[in-house]
Image: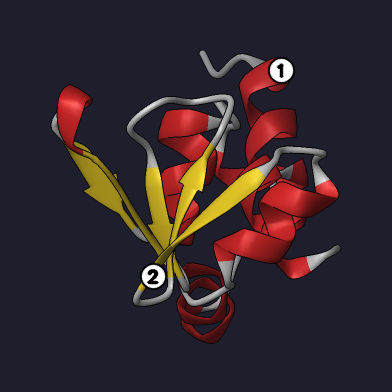
Amino acid sequence: MVNSRSLDRTTTAPRWSREQIRAARLVPLGPLLEKRGLALVETGGGNLLVAALPGLIVKDCYWRWPERDLAGNAIDFCTHVLGLCFHDAMRELLGS
């Protein structure tokens, strides 16, 4: 027997195209973090330190946090650092 609640979740969850996912991965992180009110410190070479998160470095759409052995693209940042689910990360990055 299929639970109707599980069907509702799958039919209402947005489907993201490959192009949308590719675009979200490439969203620059600096403006996103500034929009969220996080202070950034330029360190040269396009690298930015996130003042509120010691050791976290962002550059363009990539980030790394050596102390925690984490790194990735813009979607990974939203899910691993900001704690968003994938769908909320996509909405945040694509502005939808």
Q: Say which amino acid is labelled 1.
A: Arg
What x and y, as percent, mark residue 46?
A: 42, 75
Which quarter of the figure has residue 36?
top right
What number is the disc on residue 52?
none
Q: Is residue 18 left or right of residue 55?
A: right
Looking at the rendered structure, the secondary structure element under dot 2 is strand
**Label 1: few (<14), some or many (≥20) within 10 Å?**
few
Q: Nearer the viewer, residue 2 or 92?
A: 92
Q: What residue sits right under mark 1 in the picture?
A: 5
Q: Nearer the viewer, residue 80 or 2?
A: 80
Residue 48's place in the image compared with 51, above or below, is below
Residue 83's place in the image compared with 50, above or below, is above
Looking at the rendered structure, the secondary structure element under dot 1 is helix
What x and y, as percent, mark residue 16?
A: 59, 67
Which quarter of the figure has residue 29?
bottom right
**Label 2: few (<14), some or many (≥20) within 10 Å?**
few
* Disc with the residue nearer the chain's start (2 vs 1): 1
Q: Nearer the viewer, residue 72 or 5?
A: 72
What x and y, as percent, mark residue 95?
A: 83, 64
User: Which residue corresponds to the image point at 58% horizontal and 25% vertical from the top-left?
Assistant: 52
User: Which residue corresponds to the image point at 41% horizontal and 25% vertical from the top-left?
Assistant: 54
Image depth: mark 2 or mark 1 in front: 2
Q: CA distance from mark 2 to mark 1?
A: 51 Å
Residue 90's place in the image compared with 67, above or below, is below
Q: What residue sits right under mark 2 in the picture?
A: 44
Q: Is residue 2 visible to the viewer in this orientation of the structure?
A: yes
Q: Is residue 14 visible to the viewer in this orientation of the structure?
A: no
Q: Is residue 23 left or right of residue 45?
A: right
User: Which residue corresponds to the image point at 55% horizontal and 77% vertical from the top-left?
Assistant: 17
